[in-house]
Image (cartoon, rainbow, N blue to C red):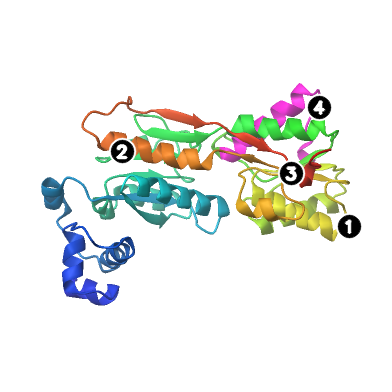
Amino acid sequence: MSATMRDVARLAGVSVKTVSNVVNDFPHVSVATRTRVLAAITELGYQMNFSARSLSKGRTGMLTLAVPSLRLPYFAELTDEVILAAGERGYTVLVEQTGGVHERELEVLSSDRRRMTDGLILSPLGLRPGDEPRLEVGYPLVLLGERPLHGDVDHVAMANVAGARAVTEHLLARGRRHIVLVGSYDQRGAGAGSLRTQGFLDALHAAGLEHDPAGTGAALEWTRATGADAMRRLLDRGVEVDAVFGLNDVLALGAMRVLFERGLRVPDDVAVAGFDDIEDGRFARPSLTTVQPGRAEIARTAVDLLMDRLSDNPARPPGEEVVVAHRLLVRESTGQGR
């Protein structure tokens, strides 16, 4: 049987009147209550006539943000920034996790749940060339990240190549010449890993150095555990190392833990740097040198693009691409102040 408004009220722990207020977008409903009711509606599959409501109300006052996983610190912090930016514009954000799975990302694009919100910010890992027709949706859409997708879709990206080159140049300026790379990347050149690796190699080539493939510690998933495992394998193979560049901060933190386990001092014996400027890196001991990719600006730009698309007279051309500026943050793990 189809779910009723009473079923939604029971699951959400509110009155039927409150559910009605949310469905009809009445004011004076708290953000927490509205979010709880909408979550119950989604779980039960309760069917609301959002098309009719949109004709009379104009907007739902909600946006969707779809990210690979909130367990990854970068995406958790990005989500927080998007919620803050949307809140300043009077919008609530519904968050979905895709796991970076191709089918799940496509499902997010076409789900009936999109009727609940006015636009979608999607950070894809699984989308690939050929998926462009699936991006032709009837609502505002902004992509985040570095998937090689083209078309009239707004896209906000970070300066992966320039940022990786800057941190590698910093390690070289510290006198490091045996820099290992921790992380994995798409051999086709797609994604942040490939772009950061390109920046790393560009800096080495400019210094007249070559990177030995044996000095790459593969880590298909970018977590502390995989960063630690990659570092162990490098050391067990006897790879000469005086610096580590983790393709993100959690990989670098995992690698740094193993260096301590093996009795190597950071930064005296081995300098360590990452990318993303997650909060954990600032409070690590030693604190982690990293690239600040402009996370707050990425979030704000994505929300602004959606707001512009929702206006009657968009000021930006379709398919706008915005690359946010980066900043190198030198901390203790590479010899801050030396």
Q: Which mark is residue 331?
A: 3
Q: Say whether residue 210 is magenta.
A: yes
Q: Label 3 vs label 1: CA separation?
A: 21 Å
- For marks 4 and 2, the one nearer the N-term is 4
- For marks 4 and 1, the one nearer the N-term is 4
Q: Which mark is residue 263?
A: 1
Above or below, 184 relative to 211 = below
| Disc 4 versus disc 2: nearer the observer | 2
Relative side of 26 to 123, left or right: left
Kind of residue at badge 3: Arg
- For marks 3 and 4, the one nearer the N-term is 4
Q: Label 2 vs label 3: CA separation?
A: 37 Å
Residue occupying image coordinates x 16% and y 70%: 17
Q: Label 4 vs label 1: CA separation?
A: 28 Å
The image position of residue 10, as x and y in percent, is 24, 77
Q: Which mark is residue 99?
A: none
Task: Mark 3 and mark 1 in contact? Answer it, CB < 8 Å.
Answer: no
The image position of residue 275, as x and y in percent, is 64, 42
Q: Secondary structure at mark 4?
A: loop
Above or below, 280 relative to 302 = below
- For marks 1 and 2, the one nearer the N-term is 1
Q: Quadrant of residue 149?
A: top left
Q: Say whether residue 130 is magenta.
A: no
Q: Label 1 vs label 2: CA separation?
A: 53 Å
| Disc 1 versus disc 2: nearer the observer | 2
**Residue segment shown in magenta:** 192-214
| Disc 3 versus disc 4: nearer the observer | 3
Residue 328 shows up from this direction: yes
- For marks 2 and 3, the one nearer the N-term is 2
Dominant secondary structure of the residues highlighted in magenta in the image? helix
Q: Secondary structure at mark 1?
A: loop
Q: Which mark is residue 307?
A: 2
